Image: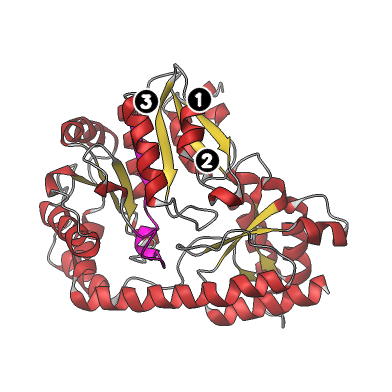
Amino acid sequence: MQISRRAEKIEPFYVMEVAKAASELGRSVAHTDAPMVFLNIGEPDFTAPPLVQAAAQRAISQGHSQYTQATGLPALRERISDWYASRFGVNVPASRIVVTAGASAALQLACLALIDAGDEVLMPDPSYPCNRHFVSAADGRAVLIPTTAAQRFQLSADQVQAAWGPKTRGVLLASPSNPTGSSIDPDELRRIHAVVQARGGVTMVDEIYLPLSFDAHYGQTALALDDSVISINSFSKYFNMTGWRLGWMVVPQALVPVIERLAQNLFICPSTIAQHAALACFEPESIALYETRRAEFKARRDYFVPALQSLGLDVPVAPDGAFYAWADCSAACARLGLKDSWDFSFAVMQQAHVAITPGRDFGTDLTAQFVRFSTASSMEQLHMAIARLRKMLA
């Protein structure tokens, strides 16, 4: 069977490949005194709040399970619009909000709507691997630009200006970022957007971790810049609904019918049950619970990052949001006689029974010396992981 060139260009998602190996080893040690600690997947250990679960059950029992509009339930679009006003103080009309089958569908729709074959999209290195694959799936090319800790592993306006070429279509950023948990400084984002606008390009910002910001300076939506910014968001992370596969995007008004046309053909609509459930995310009781959980994520970061530093696993940029620690393991590799972060990750998995993610997925510049830890697991699990790492690295 002949495979398309498009499919051949998509690299494996190594996060999931490592996860398979970790799960296999985890099963073999599950009943020992050192069961596997999983810090490799960015999935909150919290589940959907009681009101959300009850809303889903109610939708099922009342038969609210038929197709919705391709753009989502009007009531949910209104709730999201109200949330932007109350949470971020920005006016985002519900008519510009499109509910999608997860942030992944939103990114795919945005890329298909805006990218032609051969177009280039500028992205930071490191960055979430699937984002560049969405560009490739639209027959575009992701151009990864190396970043440094000094610039918070985010692009600068000067870099965007220098890298812009005749085929450049725009930028795809993430704030806070996966894998670093670092956000773009709002002033730098404003300068980047100005560069993009001056060249007739498009600014796309993945904001799925934005509600999990721990610093008011960085916790601002890019939608405050102007109505041309495209923002991608999700119910997975802050709203603890990973497997419900529900997200949304905010696009310029003129782009809505284009996105709707694509969504009608590719997805019909997002999950109706998930949409009815998500209405309850914005109830005061649910928001209060989400904020309690956000404080817990911050407490986990505040424990785990200094603990990594004490082990010689340097985290050069303190994460200001999300639940990741991007740690330099090069010194540990040298001590242990290991080649790079890929070998280090498997050594940690096999010797300490702690699953982590090597940097290979996230780019090519210096990623061989970094690993990503997820702090989405409980504090008990984090303490256990640090104790095992300390023993292994002693």
Per the rendering, the mark at residue 18 is: none
Residue mark closest to the camera, 1 vs 2:
2
Tell me the residue that label 3 is attached to. Answer: 115
Tell me the residue that label 1 is attached to. Answer: 6
What residue lies at 72% left-to-right and 58% top-to-bottom? Answer: 345
Which residues fall within the magenta stretch?
Answer: 202-219
Question: N-terminal of the two: label 2 or label 3?
Answer: 3
Q: CA distance from mark 1 to mark 2?
A: 22 Å
Q: Secondary structure at mark 2?
A: strand
Residue 367 spot, x, y in % from top left: 66, 46
What residue lies at 71% left-to-right and 80% top-to-bottom? Answer: 387
Question: N-terminal of the two: label 1 or label 2?
Answer: 1
Residue 275 spot, x, y in % from top left: 22, 57
Q: Quadrant of residue 309?
A: bottom right
Question: N-terminal of the two: label 1 or label 3?
Answer: 1
Q: Is residue 354 visible?
A: yes
